[in-house]
């Protein structure tokens, strides 16, 4: 690590890294590169104003509430708006609430677990109020907890004053539900107390605070657009804590872009109208150890004749069968297409073997790396990649997996570079294009939009041709899922262009 001052500001790179580590240890947040400059200028300002070095400042922060709040505010991304990802609210209205109603649940417990300034929780409450009005004052009620680590955001929530930016095209299908509770002023929109005061607003740090009081309390948790800013290890830890607060058969919603990076042994992925969310397994499912794969049942046509895709590589790939393909360079013909073919066949059929071919061994190695990633054993995954990668010519699978490993470590820029390399090896490697678009989305939305468009086209032709060879890279999801994501993001980015 070099200790030279960060460009244009008066704190050293070493001091800055110390602050980043302290923030991650406290909150789990790994600051995206795009926010680096803002934090550097914030810290430089604070160190000067308080006349402290970084060590002293970091000690001061944990003892001083106002300073803590200011630092947390500088590192959190608080972007949110009413009825964000309106598809989730549609599922709630048309699917989950009627289901609970049929089961006789009259009161359901909801947690907006990283609520920022509260738009998510208010949206939900407006929806419940709307449905009760439709039923003449009868129907389901909700107890709503809304929490965040950022005291500044919670203060905004408590004031209930919003800007027009809190109302976007995405969400507009339901924004009408807020009308009876709105007062418009020249530069702001005020939400009526009646809607806000029913919500229990608390400061909760999902990474550090004791959540045991909330054990198995919630029927529904929204934890959207938050884990994305954390390393996969920390995501796993937070997910573990949050899952404990869900009731059996309770639902967890993450944002669409987070879902492919998440798996948990107690969570079952569900899909309704191409919208994906998790359900906590119930005791009966856990006793039976069943792991039905609803994705396969929902869109069987994408899977060819081969049938179900096991969600867990572990179940099809006993570790003792993983040979080490040493001393191969130059001696054996390496063929990436064959590796792809073998990996997808093996993933799909545990009896599939082709041991005579070195490409088969590589296919097993790649499957093993994916299994390690799913087990959150990223360091082991990287170690294995480092062993096998030098044995192979540059190829799209290695580049893709390197990209994926960077992504889960929270290095989107490095990941984007690796995904670009995968595309240089094979421009048709659409999983790499998909994730490349994800890494570009915030800083280069126009390029990301074009990438999603190209990726969507590539996926369509992949599906049309009944192809299967990238399936093993998709972690149990199918091509149709990625196609939906591409279309969704293209639409959103297009809308963002129209809605400043
Ligand atoms: C981008 S906002 C998401 C808001 C809302 N869930 C949505 O999807 O529109 C992310 C929020 O996560 C909060 N956050 C980050 N780390 C957290 C932690 N460790 N505990 C609780 N909240 C956290 C941030 O303060 C921020 O308000």
Image (spheres, helix red, strand yellow):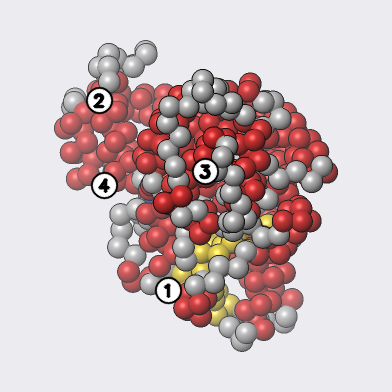
Q: Are marks 1 and 4 in contact (CB under 8 Å)?
A: no
Which residue is identified by label 3? 364
Question: What percent of the width, then of the height, locates residue 73?
Answer: 39, 40
**Rendered location of residue 303, percent (x, y):** 73, 53
The relative height of residue 93 versus residue 26 in the rendered view (above or below) is: below
Label 4 SS: helix
- Towards the viewer: 36 or 116: 36
* 10 Å crowding of disc 4: few (<14), some (14-19), many (20+): few
Q: Which numbered disc, 1 or 4, marks the residue that appears first in the sequence?
A: 4
Residue 447's image quarter?
Answer: top right
**Kind of element beneath mark 1:** loop
Q: Does the residue tagged 4 have its C-beta within 8 Å of any atom of ligand 1?
A: no
Residue 127 position (above or below residue 149): below
Q: Which residue is mark 1?
A: 216
User: Considering only order in the chain, which callout, 4 or 3, is on the residue closer to the N terminus?
Assistant: 4
Q: Which residue is mark 2?
A: 15
417 vs 97, nearest the viewer: 417
Q: Is residue 156 visible?
A: no
Alpha carbon separation for disc pair 1 and 4: 31 Å
Query: Which of the 4 quarters of the picture holds residue 294?
Result: bottom right
Residue 290 in the image, given as x and y percentages of width and height: 54, 72
Residue position marked by numbered label 4 in the rendering:
65
Q: Secondary structure at mark 2?
A: helix
Foreground residue among 494 and 339: 339
Marks 1 & 2, CB-CB < 8 Å contact:
no
Circle 3 or circle 4, nearest the eye = 3
Q: Position of residue 234 (x, y in %)?
A: 38, 48
Tell me the quarter of the image containing the C terminus.
top right
Element under label 3? helix
């Amino acid at each position: 690590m070099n200790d030279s001052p960060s460009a244009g500001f008066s704190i050293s790179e070493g001091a800055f890294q110390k602050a980043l580590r302290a923030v991650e240890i406290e909150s789990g947040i790994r600051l995206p590169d795009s926010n680096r400059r803002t934090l550097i200028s914030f810290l430089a300002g604070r160190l000067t104003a308080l006349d402290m070095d970084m060590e002293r400042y970091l000690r001061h922060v944990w003892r001083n509430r106002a300073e803590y709040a200011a630092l947390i505010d500088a590192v959190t991304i608080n972007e949110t708006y009413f009825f964000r990802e309106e598809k989730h609210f549609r599922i709630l209205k048309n699917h989950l609430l009627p289901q609970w109603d049929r089961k006789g649940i009259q009161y359901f417990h909801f947690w907006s677990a990283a609520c920022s300034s509260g738009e998510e929780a208010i949206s939900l409450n407006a929806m419940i109020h709307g449905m009760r009005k439709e039923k003449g004052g009868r129907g389901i009620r909700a107890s709503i907890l809304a929490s965040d680590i950022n005291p500044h955001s919670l203060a905004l929530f408590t004031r209930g004053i919003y800007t027009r930016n809190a109302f976007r095209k995405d969400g507009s299908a339901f924004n009408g539900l807020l009308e009876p509770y709105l007062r418009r002023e020249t530069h702001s929109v005020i939400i009526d107390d009646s809607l806000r005061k029913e919500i229990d607003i608390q400061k909760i740090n999902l990474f550090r605070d004791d959540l045991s009081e909330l054990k198995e309390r919630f029927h529904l948790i929204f934890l959207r657009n938050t884990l994305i800013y954390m390393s996969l290890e920390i995501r796993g830890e937070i997910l573990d804590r949050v899952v404990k607060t869900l009731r059996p058969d309770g639902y967890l919603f993450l944002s669409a872009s987070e879902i492919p990076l998440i798996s948990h042994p107690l969570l079952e992925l569900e899909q309704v109208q191409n919208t994906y969310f998790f359900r906590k397994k119930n005791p009966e499912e856990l006793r039976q150890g069943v792991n039905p794969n609803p994705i396969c049942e929902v869109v069987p046509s994408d899977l060819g004749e081969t049938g179900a895709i096991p969600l867990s590589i572990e179940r099809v790939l006993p570790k003792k069968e993983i040979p080490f393909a040493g001393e191969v360079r130059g001696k054996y013909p390496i063929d990436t297409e064959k590796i792809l073919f073998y990996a997808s066949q093996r993933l799909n059929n545990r009896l599939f073997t082709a041991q005579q071919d070195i490409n088969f061994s590589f296919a097993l190695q790649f499957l093993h790396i994916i299994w390690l990633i799913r087990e959150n054993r990223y360091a082991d995954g990287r170690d294995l990649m480092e062993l096998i990668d030098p044995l192979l010519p540059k190829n799209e699978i290695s580049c893709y997996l390197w990209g994926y490993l960077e992504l889960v470590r929270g290095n989107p820029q490095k990941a984007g570079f690796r995904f670009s390399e995968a595309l240089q090896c094979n421009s048709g490697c659409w999983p790499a294009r998909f994730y490349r678009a994800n890494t570009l989305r915030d800083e280069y939305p126009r390029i990301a939009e074009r990438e999603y468009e190209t990726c969507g086209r590539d996926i369509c032709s992949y599906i049309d041709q009944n192809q299967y060879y990238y399936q093993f890279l998709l972690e149990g999801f199918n091509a149709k899922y990625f196609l939906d994501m591409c279309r969704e993001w293209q639409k959103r980015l297009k809308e963002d262009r129209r809605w400043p």
